[in-house]
Amino acid sequence: MAKIKVTQIRSKIGSTKRQKLTLQALGLKKISATAEHEATPQILGMVNKVNHLVKVEEI
């Protein structure tokens, strides 16, 4: 399965609680934090919910 690299590029201040928890579940704690994940449907759905806060790169 493909891997993706998710980087937080915007602040979570002002986001909903659900979006903050999604960022936490992805392993992103602050701006410029990066996490690598398998591109499963669950992870892609989480990334889609916070796509305005993160940048996604395929590895």
Image (cartoon, rainbow, N blue to C red):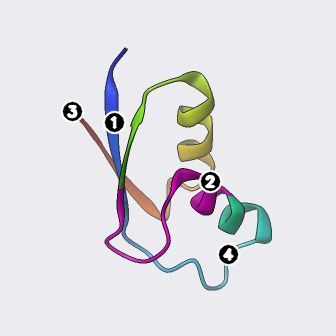
Q: Which mark is residue 25?
A: 2
User: Helix or strand or loop: what does disc 3 sit on?
Assistant: loop
CA gap, disc 1 to disc 4? Answer: 23 Å
Q: Is residue 10 above or below residue 13?
A: above
Q: Are marks 1 and 3 in contact (CB under 8 Å)?
A: yes
The amino acid beneath tag 1 is Ile
Query: What numbered label is drawn on residue 59?
Result: 3
Spatial CA distance of label 4 from label 3 is 28 Å
Q: Taking 34 as reference, is 16 left or right?
A: right
- Which quarter of the figure has residue 13? bottom right
Comes first in the chain, label 2 or label 4: 4
Q: Position of residue 39 (x, y in %)?
A: 44, 26
Number of residues whose C-alpha sits closer than 10 Å to that of mark 3, classed few (under 14), some (14–19) or many (20 or more) = few
The kind of residue on which mark 3 rests is Ile
Q: Amino acid at mark 4?
A: Ser
Q: Would you identify the image quadrant in which residue 31 lies?
A: bottom left
Mark 2–mark 1 Cα distance, whole angstroms, equals 15 Å
Camera-nearest label, 1 or 4: 1
Q: Residues within 10 Å of mark 4 (few under 14, many from 20)?
A: few
Is residue 4 rendered to the left or right of residue 40? left
Between the C-alphas of marks 1 and 3, the distance is 5 Å
Which residue matches tag 4?
Answer: 15
Residue range of the region highlighted in magenta in the rendering: 22-34
Residue at image location 75% in from the left, 71% down from the top? 16
Residue corresponding to mark 1:
4
Q: Residue placed at 31% from the left, 72% from the top?
A: 32
Mark 2 crowd level (few <14, some 14–19, many ≥20, 10 Å Cα): few
- Secondary structure at numbered mark 4: loop
